[in-house]
Image (cartoon, rainbow, N blue to C red):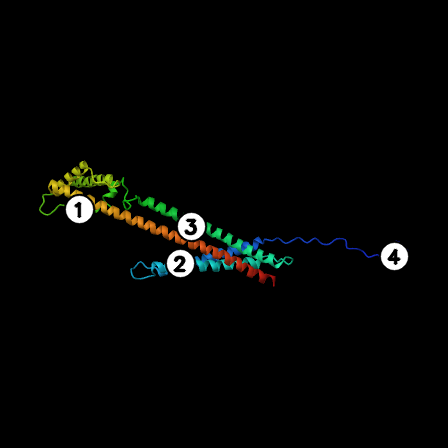
Amino acid sequence: MNHTELGAGVATPLVATQHVRPREAVSWGAILAGAVGMAAFSLILLTLGTGLGLSSLSPWPGSGAHAKTFGAAVVIWIVVSQIMASGLGGYLAGRLRRHWPDISGDETHFRDTAHGFLAWALATLLMAGLLASAASGVGRTAAVAAAESGVHTAAGLGGVDRGNAQTAWQTWPMGYLIDGMLRPVDGAAAQVQTRPEQALASVAQKQEIARIFLNSLPSGSALSTEDAHYVSQAVARQTGLSAADAQARVTTTYTRLQDKMNALDTAARAAADEARKATIHATLWLFVSLLIGAFAASYMATVGGRLREF
């Protein structure tokens, strides 16, 4: 028997099996696609909600939605938007991920859930970055506009800068009260400002009185004896009142100014407290809506993953 016949009678074994590369557990392309779809749909829903919200508001009294009704509608819309956008993104991430034929059903369910959650997390970060950038841009624009218009804010003075007496005496309520304090009464021999120099001196006098008032307002105390006497003399010359009547007018005017400043300060504190409460409620509901969105994205990813296996 030759070698050819011997070789023909023996079965030839397989040389080697083909190496199959294991499939990766994370499909980043599907996650990115789901996140992009989620962010885009969230932007669409946000735009729609803004338009509907503005259409329900009105500057006229007695028309438009009530504040509580509007707030409840905003909360409902945020939650619904999160469910819809997150569900869409999670479904895309689950449906577009790669096929895993050799793993158990429990592992497939876990991976689908993870894909939906990662898509939601990436979309949330993208939206947070976009909103933060937009908010910073609006803040810079507002700051530039405020700087150009010369608006100064000071606590307890309703937006009047304490060091700027020229602005203070022209601003309500200080300007109005100083003008009323220097207003002549009927039958009194008041000075008549006929020359431009006298008019300029009157303006300078109002600014000086404003500086005197501003010096005592922050502490909440009454005018000092020297300041009250000096201002009463100016009032007597300007209005023709007696010294006693001028002193009484100065005291009354300064007391009224203190009351108005206290009222403005109280209103500002109340507004700040309302803004604080509104911020707390908005933050809590935003937290709840984000949790709901994460759950919706994870669940819909499992739905899309099951359809992917068929």
Q: In which quarter of the image is the N terminus?
A: bottom right
Mark pair 3, 2: CA separation: 20 Å
Mark 4 sits on what residue? 5
- 1 vs 3, front mark: 1
Asked if one can make out residue 280 in the rendered structure from this viewpoint, the answer is: yes
For residue 180, the mark is 1
Tag 4: Cα neighbours inside 10 Å, few (<14), some, or many (≥20)? Answer: few
- Quadrant in which residue 70 is drawn: bottom left
Q: Residue at x 37, y 47 (%)?
A: 141
Horizontally, is 287 left or right of 208 in the view? right
Q: Residue at x 61, y 61 (%)?
A: 309
Tag 1: Cα neighbours inside 10 Å, few (<14), some, or many (≥20)? Answer: few
- Please identify the residue farthest to the front as the structure is shown: 106
- Which x, y percent locates residue 174? 22, 45
Secondary structure at numbered mark 1: helix
Q: Which residue is drawn at 90% across and 54% down?
A: 2
Mark 3 sits on what residue? 134
